[in-house]
Amino acid sequence: VTVNSLEAEGSILVNVCAKKVVAKNCILYNVIDDSEDGIVMPDGGVRADVFMPGHDKVVIKSTMETDGGKAWKVCVEGNSKSFEDVYKANGSVDIIEAQAMSAGAK
């Protein structure tokens, strides 16, 4: 986790880079944000950024209450893709290229 300002309580952050993170009872995974406002999560929010070479970064949002199995085919929390859509699109991605893309993301 690399941030300038962190206000987190009861949250899990993995591979997160941002100027600021505010999170309570949240999960953030593989999130990269260079906005001045940083990341301000709703209580119980979940966010994961997905990097696929040749595509824009996909931001997937959910909640701690969302059952991903039951909502597998549904676009939840304003997402442009369902969990299934991301899974299918990500299936043939070269993980080395995706890692390089995330390393250079802003």
Image (cartoon, rainbow, N blue to C red):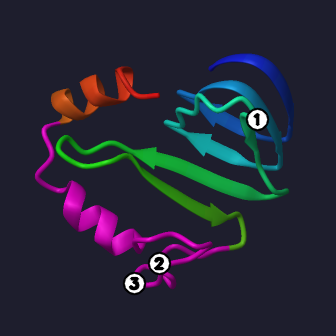
Q: Residue at x 62, y 72 (%)?
A: 77
Of pointers 1 and 3, the one earlier in the residue sequence: 1
Q: Classify mark 3: residues with Cα within 10 Å, few (<14), some (14-19) or many (20+).
A: few
Q: Which residues are magenta?
A: 66-94
Q: Which numbered disc, 1 or 2, marks the residue that appears first in the sequence? A: 1
Query: What x and y, as percent, mark residue 92?
Result: 11, 52
Which residue type carries mark 2? Gly
Measured as percent of width and height from the top left, residue 86 is found at 32, 63
Residue corresponding to mark 2: 69
Q: Which residue is mark 3?
A: 73
CA gap between label 1 and label 2 equals: 32 Å
Q: Is residue 88 magenta?
A: yes
Label disc, if present, on residue 50 of the rendered structure:
none
**C-alpha distance separating marks 3 and 2:** 9 Å
| Secondary structure state at the residue bearing disc 2 | loop
24 left or right of 15 in image: right
Q: Nearer the viewer, mark 3 or mark 2?
A: 3
Q: Which residue is mark 1?
A: 37
**How far across and down, in percent of the image, does residue 35 sit?**
64, 32
Along the line of sight, the residue nearer the viewer: 80 or 76: 80
What amino acid type should be assigned to the residue bearing mark 1?
Asp
**Label 1 secondary element:** loop
Q: Given the image, on which type of amino acid does mark 3 rest?
A: Lys
73 in magenta = yes
The picture quadrant where one finds residue 14 is: top right
